Image (cartoon, helix red, strand yellow):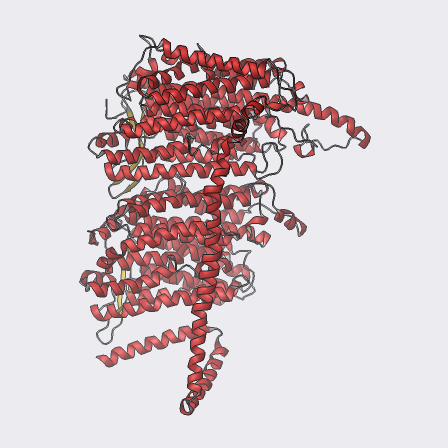
Amino acid sequence: MHLSETATTGYFFLAPWLVFAPVIGLLVNIIFGGRFSEKVIGTVASLASGASFVVSVLLAWSLAAGHGAAVTVPFLEWIHIGNLELDWAFRVDSLSTTMMLVVSGVGTLIHIYAIGYMHEDVRFKGDPGRFRRFFVFLNLFIAMMMILVSGDSYLMLFVGWEGVGLCSFLLIGFWYDMDTLGRPSWANSNAAKKAFVTNRVGDFGFLVAAFLMFWAFGSFQFDEVFEAAHAVAPGVIVAITLFMLIGVAGKSAQIPLYVWLPDAMAGPTPVSALIHAATMVTAGVYLITRSAELYTLVPQAQYIVAMTGAITALFAATIAVGQYDIKKVLAYSTISQLGFMVAAVGMGAFVAGMFHLVTHAFFKALLFLSAGSVILGLERGHHHAEHSHHEQKSKGKGGKSKVEGGHGAHDRHEEVFDPGDMRNMGGLRKTMPVTFWLYMIGTLALAGIVPFAGFWSKDEILLDASLHYPTVYLLLSIAAFFTAFYMGRQIWMVFFGEPRHEAAAHAEESKPIITAPLMVLAALSLLGGALNLPFEGFHQLGHWLEYTLHEVEALPLDLQVAGISTLLALTAIFLSWLIYGRNPLKAGQPDPLKKPLGFIFTGMENKWFVDEGYFAVIINPFKRLSYFLADVVDWRFWHDWFHETVIAGTYNWLSNIGLNLYADQKGIDAFANWLGTATQSLSATLRKVQNGFVRSYALSVLVGVVFILGYLILKS
Amino acid sequence: MEFLLQPLTLLTFFPLLGVLLILFINAEAKNAIRWVALATSLITFGISLWVLAMFDASNVNLQLVARYDWITVAGWNIQYFLGIDGLSILLVLLTAFLTPISILSTWTAVEERVKDFMIFFLLLEVGMTGVFLAQDLFLFYIFWEFTLVPMYFLIGIWGGPRRIYAAIKFFLYTMAGSILMLLAILWLGIYGGTFSVPDLVALGNIPANIQWWLFLAFTAAFAIKVPMWPLHSWLPDAHVEAPTAGSVILAGVLLKMGTYGFVRFNLPLFPEAAVRAAPWIALLATIGILYGAMVSYAQADVKKLVAYSSVSHLGFVMLGLFAMNPQGIAGGILQMINHGLSTGALFLLVGMIYEQTHTREIKVYGGLWKITPVFGSIMLIVSLSSMGLPGLNGFVGEFTILLGAFGSQAIGNTAYAIASALGVIMAAVYILYMFQKMFLGPQGEIVDEVKKHGHGLRDLNWREIVTVVPLLIFIFWIGLYPKPFFALMAPAVEHLVGMLPIP
């Protein structure tokens, strides 16, 4: 079972279509999309992603039929030079198919949702032409993600790894000419750039890990690497795993590289859900799980990974408490939940980590998409309110308002309205009931309330930590408490109380194309726990992953751990009700926690000033050094002073001295004069034929050649 | 006739036929001149494909050899000696490929003295092809120096405001290094009684201390051409002032003459010295990678930004070559091609927008992607290729280079590769900075500025698309399926590695 076999039976030969299907989808939309309506574009893209899902299902089915034996599907010889043999092959095993199913399954749902969402979004932003581009990028993302999870070697994984980074860049910067409120600005493109560059820092770690791996094991192929790892000094493995952790920190938004993810919320909401919550950011967790055989060899590295995850989980959860933007809260929550997963796989609880990855994909996608529905609802409400105001105003002007496609562009609004700010919301339970209930399901799953999916997966992580890593257990438990608290805060602020803005009062529920995919995700968030119930005879995900991972520990439910975590969550929700639910926030009122917590809340609000710290310590010094090198060192010193003054100047000075020396002596003076005249006449003659010193250079080369040849002849 | 019909002779000198034809065309018939030049370069490209078809990659020796005694006096034996092998074939193809593209790019950009321009351009192609094919040191030197002259005029006549200064600096700088190389070549000729490279390599046994000086003399010429840090000072001047087509050829091919020189001459002729120098070259290369990337980031002029990025990219090439293992050298050679494609394309694209706006200042741009979507998308692909995104050509070269350098016994320290890998982050910093400031964000002031003077900015026209699409095809091809490219050079590279006395 250890070494992969080549496919014989089943649908394994379809594996390349995981990637081809979305690529075909995006090519069709690039080439013909100009003539398609929005519906057709969206359908093509969704079908392409759906085809990937169908292939994933067939692969999983074939795998199950073959009792889980890993299969390698060779596809293309990529780089062959020296002893480097790098091929693009697809690896179908229980781990990769799990990822494939999540990515293409959730991905397809989000494609469908995005048809409805982007239809409205491009109109609110005043640029319907970008609808097609969105789906091209989304398909590209699915293709890249599939390369990532299906690659049979670290290098193919890396190809997908960087590829999804690109898609992330393109989609965060989708509205590249504005900020999140639609004003002309560099903000969104800055966020996109920040994400790409931060990810590149992580990729640097990945690359170094890959180099170490190649020169230690002679291969990038998973099986060969794992086979060889046992014979290599642990020091090398520690180095490999820790450099890999840098990559994980970049992609999965862990300390210290998490800073890009909150800014990534600049992307349209479906992007936040798909890329920055459900799939791409979990790639790091997948990478560690994939490298289980390396990590389990070096407990020191495992400890560092687990602590990184646990600290991130708590740290991000504290920031989430102080945020006002509905998506920012979810973003920090994502970082925190990724911390849970990283802690889990760091502790060696790979199944628990993967389990949480899957359930988190369901409920966090649900939450983000529901948040998108809320934002759209507010936008609609805002436009209604604006529209009626505007009509009243423009009556006097003869009603000559420029209206594009029924909606005005944002720049006409006098007051900038932020549809994502929770302080503008309130009472949405009544105006958007469907969204409200969907959001509730997501919240309960995230907070870890029985029997929602999040409870089971989070509990498994906590249980494992309580047994092996007490510090991690403590950190994660506090983080879980915060999680329930900030989600409670959000629910009270968004859906309860009275509307704090007229947009919230006029908010409208979303159409079925938006809510239908949400219902599927809600069902999954409710029932997802069934994937791996901690009872005798269940543990299905564990058994499934056991085909790929070894020594899977199937722990039974521990009532003490489960009880404590449930108690913590309920206490936190109760506390949030006391603060935000009992006395709902009024318009313009500061956060009730601001006063009692003082500077601590200021820190939470301002993300503990980490961005500012990075600017002060890394980014600004880098900029200053760049400018110093470019302007002072390279240009003024090296280019101007050294080349102009020293080299050219010395040359001129020497030739002047030479002339003066000769001029003092009569004989030489005469000679020099003659030489001068001769040269002058010669050069005058030359100047008639041609101009510039290149000709005289050509002449001197000729003279030189003649001289050399003469020397050679005379010498013989 | 037999002499002229040899494939390599034909390939080298065919552009002269175009020059001859153009001489007879009235200087006012600009389009006729353009078409003749384009046709000539296209036929030359066809000949290069014919050479490729006859080329046998598994043979590590020189192929399609054309060899005649040329000047034999006093026991000296200077030969007309052309040959091709796995180390040079890709560069020869690159030269023949980039020349028609560059000519096409001048169609509307060059309106003055078209006749002279095309004559110089075709002469330049003769020189460049000759450099890559010459197997006699003396013949090589002649071609090497010969390329300076047309390039000097291309910069000096059709360049920007400081063109004379840039042209002279380019000329003097490169010449200074060449003179040292000429001395070394003469020494070798006297020592070996021949200028033939394969014969000199076979002869071997040059005393170690002399090898060292000869190595340094050759290095002086090549390092300036590459240019290796800190000898890069001529490059930003030359690039900024050169016309677009000149920049394309300068970055795409002329710089490669330097790196090629290291592979063709320094490694096989002075193997002991080369191994001894490897850590030092690696150090300079690493500094170049990081320094070039940082300085690039701080540029306000987009052409200068691309010029400094070349310093960084060529640093990677040098690092790979002196890793002295198959991954490093093959990656280095492939990266020469990659740099020619990506940076060539960057200069082309920058030239296309410059033609409309007449400014290279980054800060006046902004939001171009919205106004010129095709241009923006192509620029994005080329930028990503330049910063080494997997799936595009740059990654394949950079990755194999870094992998080779990391495990290189000749360099002997992984620190160089790790530090150079930081260049991958910095490349993202300056390339994304450039792309963001020009193509993303709110609309820049130049857009209205251009509108005042006419129709406003337009997207790429068909001629411009035809100019860049061939480059894009190779950017994707090498990125997705580099196997045929590696296959062309692998045997020759492994043969070369076998000759090096690596500890």
Q: Position of residue A643 (x, y in %)?
A: 44, 65
Position of residue A444 relative to residue B9, above or below, is above
Q: Nearer the viewer, residue B226 or B462?
A: B226
Position of residue A35 relative to residue A589, above or below, is below
Position of residue A222 relative to residue A68, above or below, is below
- Residue sitting at 33 percent across and 36 percent down? A243
Dividing the image into 4 quarters, which one contains the C terminus of chain A? Answer: bottom left
Do we see residue A43 in this rendering?
A: no
Q: Nearer the viewer, residue B211 or B461?
A: B211
Q: Position of residue A565 (x, y in %)?
A: 42, 14
Dividing the image into 4 quarters, which one contains the N terminus of chain A? Answer: top left
Q: Position of residue A518 (x, y in %)?
A: 52, 17
- Residue sitting at 74 percent across and 24 percent down? A388
Q: Position of residue B60 (x, y in %)?
A: 23, 52
Position of residue A677 relative to residue B496, above or below, is below
Residue A437 left/right relative to A218:
right
Q: Quadrant of residue B226?
A: bottom left
Q: Quadrant of residue A297?
A: top left
Q: Nearer the viewer, residue A356 or B312?
A: A356
Q: Nearer the viewer, residue A140 or A558?
A: A558
